[in-house]
Amino acid sequence: MNKTAAMNPGGDAVREHFLAEGYAIFRGVLDTAWLDQINEEMLELFRLQLRRRNLPTSGGDFREAFQADALRLLQTDVPTYISTARMTQMLPSVHRLMISEPIMEIARRLGIEFPVISTRVSNHIISESLKIPGGYHKSPPHQDWRAIQGSLDSIVLWAPTTPVSTQSHPLEIIPRSHLLGLLPTVDHIQTPAVSDPRIREEDYQALAMNPGDVVAFSTFLVHRTGEQGDGQVRIAYSGRFNNAAEDTYVAHGYPTPYKYSYQTDLIVPDFPRANDLARVFPGAAE
Ligand SMILES: O=C(O)CCC(=O)C(=O)O
């Protein structure tokens, strides 16, 4: 049985569960060799920044090495840590994963008949020791729809590249909370946090997940990062799809809240000059 067939043993029962509960878990559907490659590439990004500062890099398994190397960079240079963590979202291997056939099959299984990408891929690197000073760390309770404002049936796909136990800052969801609709929020440094008396602490469920597993959930499902950590870093990527064929999304003319812009002032003053360019194009000259 191939992986696509394996994820659909119960036919439409999966979609029915998703519609009723707001989420569905697909176990072992992603190729773990791809996830290992992504982990290696993530680590290499951090190591490139350590090496340029003549700082050591660490051995051990991926999780130990990543945590140690990322921490070393964070302690040395916070802005570069942040831009390197962001760079892990730009890896082609990650984008390939997030539009891979198992992911698209999940979207279709859940009724997204014409999936379109809503948002750039996000990486969630969570560890107490990798908290950015004064910055955000764990996600507060939120619904992604407020950020996406796309189709009513839009989904989030969340896939860990490390094991995520219920003790290692798991994703916590409130089953059926999507049925409450768009909820009021209060300001939060990361994203507006849901504030509603019907959202109760005891209703959260922590999801234990392994590399290869994917959880797909409605963008109306309330979720957050679990507080409980075990000292080990946990990493998960998330992607989001709208349904380009959903009636209200079509009727509203495909709105988007995202703005993509750039600054024209040079970030590194006087760079590049022609002799810098000669490092790539030998013919370049002052
Ligand atoms: O990985 C996490 O802890 C948070 C993920 C999340 O909030 C999201 O993908 O919207």
Image (cartoon, grey):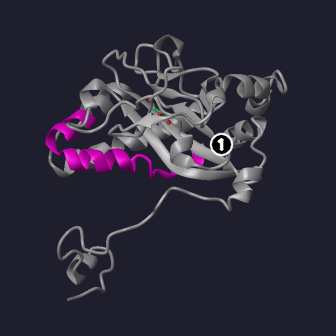
Q: Is residue 91 magenta?
A: yes
Give the answer, above or below, for where 60 lies relative to 183: above
When asked about the image quadrant of residue 266, the answer is bottom left
**The C terminus: image quadrant:** bottom left
- In the picture provided, is 11 more to the left or to the right than 282? right
Please give the name of the residue rendered at 49% of the width and 39% of the height, measured from the top-left corner: 37
- Identify the residue position indicated by label 1 in the image: 154
Disc 1 under 8 Å from ligand 1? The reply is no
Helix, strand or loop at disc 1?
loop
Note whether 126 is above or below 255 in the view shown.
above
Quadrant of res 226: top left
| Percent of width and height locating residue 140 | 41, 30
Left-right relation of 100 to 141: right
Report if residue 6 is visible in the image.
no
Amino acid type indicated by mark 1? Ser
Asked whether 210 falls inside the magenta stretch, the response is no
Q: Is residue 267 left or right of residue 93?
A: left
Q: Nearer the viewer, residue 213 or 202?
A: 202
Q: Measuring 28% from the left and 25% from the top, which residue is drawn there?
A: 128
Q: Is residue 2 visible?
A: yes
Please state, as top left, top right, bottom left or bottom right, where the N terminus lies in the image. Answer: top right
Q: Residue at x 48, y 33 (%)?
A: 142
* Crowd around label 1: few <14 · some 14–19 · many ≥20 (10 Å): many
Give the x, y percent position of residue 257: 52, 56
How many marks are shown on the rendered structure? 1
Q: Main secondary structure of the magenta part?
A: helix
Q: Which residues are magenta?
A: 70-96
Between 95 and 69, the one nearer to me in the picture: 95
Kindly identify the residue that appears in the image at 49 percent across and 16 percent down: 200
Residue 188, percent across and down? 35, 37
Question: Which residue is outermost to the top?
Answer: 202
Q: Which is more toward the observer, 200 or 267?
A: 200
